[in-house]
Image (cartoon, rainbow, N blue to C red):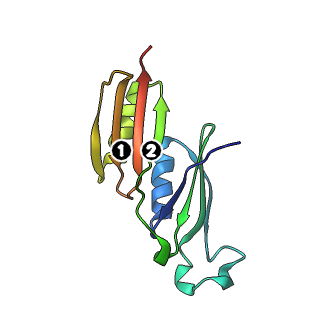
Amino acid sequence: MQLIPYLNFDGQCAEAFKFYERVLGGKLETLITHEESPMKDQVPPEWGDRIMHAYLTVGDAKLMGSDSPPEFFTKPQGLSVSINLDDVARGERIFKELSAGGTVTMPFEKTFWAERFGMLVDRFGTPWMINAGQLA
């Protein structure tokens, strides 16, 4: 079994996943629009450039997403995508880049369980928790 976060967007999925690919050092395996899908005739024409499915791999981790139908989109709440790293410097870089244009909800600083931990909501509305350098 794998548990894979699936993020929903309101028209920014392609931009968000290209950003995540760069910031996280991953590989965007799939980015398919409704227009490119075999189901293109089953959705309104204005959905053509919206993402039907995005799939990003970062090492062994996976992240998926899509653009929700506009009438069903809601902002994420009550959850975060959590990133755990051993490398504190990499964690600091990722935190800084993900938080650019977003909102820091907890600064990236030392805690009793890790060298650094912080929380943010990125410019696309996705909540993140970055945990780096676990203490023994």
Mark 1 and mark 2 residues within 8 Å of each other at the beta carbon: yes
Q: Earlier in the sequence, mark 1 or mark 2?
A: 2
Instruction: Identify the image quadrant of residue 131.
Output: top left
Residue under the point 38% across and 27% down: 89
Question: Total marks drawn?
Answer: 2
Above or below residue 73? Residue 82 is above
Mark 1 is on which residue type?
Answer: Glu
Q: Residue furthest top?
A: 136
Q: Nearer the viewer, residue 132 or 20?
A: 132
Secondary element type, mark 1: helix
Q: Is residue 124 left or right of residue 22?
A: left
109 on left or right of 55: left
Q: Which residue is mark 1?
A: 97
- What residue lies at 36% left-to-right and 52% top-to-bottom? 122
Q: Which of the labelled discs sits on residue 23, or is there none? A: 2
* Residue type for callout 2: Val
Residue 59 x/y as whole percent: 60, 37
